[in-house]
Image (cartoon, helix red, strand yellow):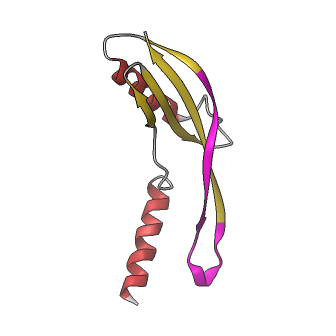
């Protein structure tokens, strides 16, 4: 019973803090660039997402003192998960992600 409450408390904390969605991250990388993805919500769209700035910062960091150019960008494969306690009905949640392919100049 204690494990159940600890898991429930952890899940609730996770949801309050930010939905447990991972922020921006580089998912493909090579010496001249890569692909970075970040989550976004329908209401704000990918261009206004607060995670977009994090994605651009990762690209700057990867390219160092060189600038970068965006090769292409668009919606990337998201993920679906189920949230909620099993005995109280669970809800499916779809997390949308945006991808940016970039090259260092």
Residue farthest to the left, as pictured:
65
Out of 92 and 35, give the one closest to the viewer: 35
In the depicted view, which residue is nearer to us: 72 or 97? 72
- Above or below, comparing residue 13 to residue 90 in the picture: above
Q: Nearer the viewer, residue 63 or 31?
A: 31
Q: Quadrant of residue 65?
A: top left
Q: Which residue shows up at 57% across the image and 33% down it?
A: 99
Seen in the image, is 105 located left or right of residue 39?
left
Q: Residue furthest bottom?
A: 1
In the figure, 57 relative to 87: above or below?
Answer: above
Q: Nearer the viewer, residue 18 or 21?
A: 21
Q: Which residues are magenta?
A: 72-91
Is residue 91 toward the left or the right of residue 63 in the image?
A: right
Q: Is residue 83 magenta?
A: yes
Counting labels gives 0
Residue shown at the point (45%, 42%) measured from the top left: 23
Residue found at the very far front of the displayed protein: 30
The N terminus - image quarter: bottom left
Q: Which picture quadrant has residue 44?
A: top right
Which secondary structure type mostly characterizes the magenta part of the structure? strand
Decide: is 91 above or below 60: below
Q: Residue at 47% of width from left, 17% of height from top? A: 103
* Viewport quadrant of the C terminus: top left
- Residue 24 image offset from top left, x and y in percent: 46, 38
Q: Is residue 100 magenta?
A: no
Residue at left offset 61%, top offset 22%: 72
Q: Position of residue 14 (x, y in %)?
A: 44, 61
């Amino acid at each position: 019973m204690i494990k159940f409450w600890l898991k429930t408390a952890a899940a609730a904390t996770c949801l309050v803090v930010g939905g447990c969605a991972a922020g921006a991250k580089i998912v493909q990388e090579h010496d001249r660039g890569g692909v970075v993805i970040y989550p976004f919500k329908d209401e704000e769209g990918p261009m206004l997402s607060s995670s977009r700035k994090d994605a651009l910062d990762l690209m700057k960091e990867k390219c160092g003192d060189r600038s970068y150019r965006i090769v292409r960008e668009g919606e990337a494969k998201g993920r679906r998960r189920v949230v909620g306690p099993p005995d109280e009905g669970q809800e499916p949640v779809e997390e949308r992600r945006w991808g940016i392919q970039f090259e260092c100049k």
